[in-house]
Image: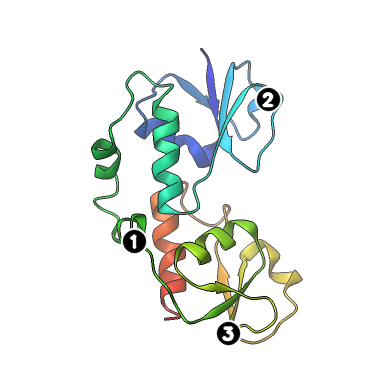
Amino acid sequence: MKIVTTPMCEEIVKLAGIDDYSVNRHPDEEDGDLAILLSESKVQMESLPIKLNTPSQIFESIRKVSEIGPKELSDEEILSFFDEYELSKKYLNSSFTRDMNIKVYSEFLKDIVLDMGFNLDSENFDYVVYPDYLKSKVLEDENLVEIPSHGGISKNPFERIEVRYAILESLI
């Protein structure tokens, strides 16, 4: 089976033990059998969509991808990938409740904000959180929090979490 993945998902493919794959931002340009890509992306070939916005999504994505790899990884093996990433590990199996309302301008940020225990509220909010690519669409002018999206941040999903979660933790 010829696997094609996108740059944002390559780290998960590697961690899952798959080493025979190609990388293309547009998987349909490749002659592949299966595309492993972010869930928001659409392709013509058969695909395995994954989400990488929160630690639990990364955990589940590694699990799903390892099921098609040479060896299905155990929970302990997957957990070991979190060891060197403090915030990823902190939020993996913990639930937090924060008394802070956040207005969000993006679906991927909703996942993160909810995972961190903030409340979503588009009317009565303490902060407005938006991805860098939507800066010109933000209507509010106070208490703005810009989060780097896919363009200006590491392709490593753990490193993305560390940066994004650290920005939001600074609000606490």
In the image shown, does 143 or 118 lie closer to the viewer?
118
Q: Where is residue 19 drawn, in percent x and y? A: 39, 22
Q: Which residue is mark 3?
A: 126
- Vertical comparison of 89 with 32: above or below: below
In the image shown, does 21 or 69 lie closer to the viewer?
69
Label 1 sits on a secondary structure element that is: loop
Distance of mark 2 from mark 1, alpha carbons? 38 Å
In the image shown, does 80 or 122 lie closer to the viewer?
122
**Pointer 3 or 1: first along the chain:** 1
Q: Where is residue 123 drawn, in percent x and y? A: 70, 81
Q: Which mark is residue 94?
A: 1
Residue lying at 42% horizontally and 73% vertically, measured from the top left? 97
Label 2 sits on a secondary structure element that is: helix
Q: Which residue is mark 2?
A: 28
Q: Is residue 109 left or right of residue 124?
A: left
Residue lying at 46% horizontally and 62% vertically, measured from the top left? 115
